Image (cartoon, rainbow, N blue to C red):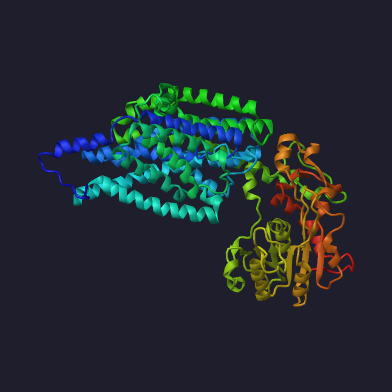
Amino acid sequence: MTSLREQDSPASAEASTARRVARYSGFRPEVQGLRFVAVLLVVIYHVFLDRVSGGVDVFLLISAFFLTLSFVRKLEAGQPLALGRYWLHVFKRLLPLAVLTVLATLVLAWLFFPEARIDRVRTEALASVFYVENWALALAEVDYYAADDSTASPFQHFWSLSVQGQVFLLWPLVFGAAWWLRRRAGWRPVPVLTALFGGILLASLAWSVHTTATNQAFAYFDTRTRLWEFALGSLLALAVPYLRLPRAARVVLGWAGMLSMVSVGVLINVQGAFPGWLALWPLLSAAAIIVAGRSGSPFGLDRVLASRPLVRLGDASYALYLVHWPLLITYLVLRDRPVAGPRSGVLIVVVSLVLAVLATKLVEQPFQRWAWPERDKRRLAVSVAVSLALVALPVLAWQQADARRAARLAEEAARNNPGAAVLQPGFEFRGDPEAPALPLASALRDEWVGLPEPCSGEFAPEQELLEQYCRQTPVVQDPARTVLVVGNSHMEQFMGAVIPLAEERNWQLVAVLQPGCAFAVRPEGDACHEGNEAALAYVEQVAPDAVLTTSTYAARMDGSAEAMVGGFPELVDRLTGQGVEVVGFRDNPRFDFDPYACAETHGEDAARCQVPVEQVLAPVNPADALRDRPGFTSLDLTDLICPGGLCRPVVGNVYVFFDPHHLTWTYARTMAPALEERLLQDPATGGTAL
């Protein structure tokens, strides 16, 4: 039985070391062929089935398998690990193809993608080349299983390469710990590594199962939920030399593993289940194939996997993974389709294979053979830095050029982009008729409305739940009114018209905006009940002069009707009974398409980008039923959002919406004068409504 501590005598040490090194030596062509099969599964499932195949998980396992074999050979031979050189070398090897793919994808995006998507594409290009794309996608709450791939990022597939790159930084530290224990305590590396990777596997798998069950969209891209897959590959590498099966068992195990691996995505829809325990299915299937190894039988799977064509394609598997996704997404954008058809799918796969083989032969392999960077670490560092700069510099320059252009246009916006002001009687346009509509696509991320400070002092919420949602304008000395804006993201965007009014009228403005939760008295069990109860308590704590909120929930273009927010009448009665005025903003329309992207693609006057208001809103504002209640004002800005009964993407050379149902801050600002007139003048009495 092997112990942790080395027991070899001096006389047998050299022979023992040679035997241990030999266990982990030798090229495994069948595993290289398996690498190609795993990536091909990913490509086929992406192109034809739009489902998870488990191929990426197998690819990660194989990466850890080869990485572990390489380091264990060094550890057993007593060689220095040279971690700094290793890190530089591995990224010098990975970056050339990645950089080529990123730059080519940026060119495709510049030529063919809607401008509204360019800013995100540029940001993710940087995230991809710096191996943090998985975190960018996780934090952006990207849905990996979205039905329409045409809206996906052309860099989305870099999530797995980012996880892999992070593990290539982390795993050598584990091997370094084993090296240190060997030097200091004389412990053999293989048992130490088995314990370390076993611990990582158990901890990461437990976290993966938990996070997949509670927040699957984030878990899918979380490095921590994937570490166990690498750990399994490392444990497999440590164990394979000791697993000796009969030839017949190897034949059966290999074919059974392959059948199991390719059937995962066909037999079950794993949507929402990965990367939890269900990922064990493809990983254990691949492990069975690797354990089967070289059977020596003419009927063994290894005769196929180790064949010259599959091994060569295995060499090109990295390139195949890189190129297939941007090709697919670009095709879907060009054809304006959610998925590829059978014929176009076959063409995409064939073109991807050809490009992968060419890129491997003409780019990856020459860079691998390039001797100059390998002479010292400084040269390796230079080659890595140059690779990163080839993406970072043009992307940053592109972003800066757009920022300067946006600043120039903003200076002329009052003249060239009047927005809702064109709807005022007697308006005469005096601007440049050739000026572009605002906001520019590169500035869309800045179109969310927000107040500058977290709530503090007398406006600090006692309710812990509201701390992250409460914002305020700087403290106003002796404010004319204290106004609370409460509700969801639609009320947030209406606030773009409220802020100028608050500044002009010396109001203290405070906002409590909870995603997806319109403000009302909600029953127990409702998803927004707890948040709205806290918001109600906060209103009573602050005792403002007025509360502004949305009173209705707009219809979608699926036939559902616009209606008053459930529990809204009870809210009005409760607050007005305490002397708080309530202003109910009618909800803005919701569409089943993106008006901004539609106008970019087809033109702002295209019929397909315009929707009659009766398709998205009720004939009469449902909240008008509460008009007679003292202290309540029903406010309808629909004629500003959809003038003339037609919801158009651009009004007054300003985009009205920046996504299917959120107003741009730029357009909301231009509604401020009309809002002031309506909010401060009660048409029924001629007095002020607020």
Question: Which x, y percent locates residue 236?
Answer: 35, 42
Question: Which x, y percent locates residue 571?
Answer: 75, 70
Q: In which quarter of the image is residue 233?
A: top left
Q: In this image, 450 relative to 494: left or right?
A: left
With respect to residue 318, does 490 lie above or below?
Answer: below
Question: Which x, y percent locates residue 526?
Answer: 68, 64
Q: Quadrant of residue 63?
A: top left
With respect to residue 437, does 217 lie above or below?
Answer: below
Q: Which quadrant is home to the C terminus? A: bottom right
Q: Which of 444 and 578 is in front in this view?
A: 578
Q: Nearer the viewer, residue 634 or 419?
A: 634
Q: In which quarter of the image is residue 172?
A: top left
> Which residue sits furthest bottom?
578
Identity of the residue drawn at 77% across and 40% down: 609
Q: In this image, 653 relative to 394: left or right?
A: right
Let me know if residue 78 appears in the view: yes
Identity of the residue drawn at 55% across and 42% down: 123
| Count of picture labels | 0
Q: Which of 263 and 378 is in front in this view?
A: 263
Let me know if residue 112 appears in the view: no
Question: Which x, y percent locates residue 451?
Answer: 63, 60
> Which residue sits furthest left?
11
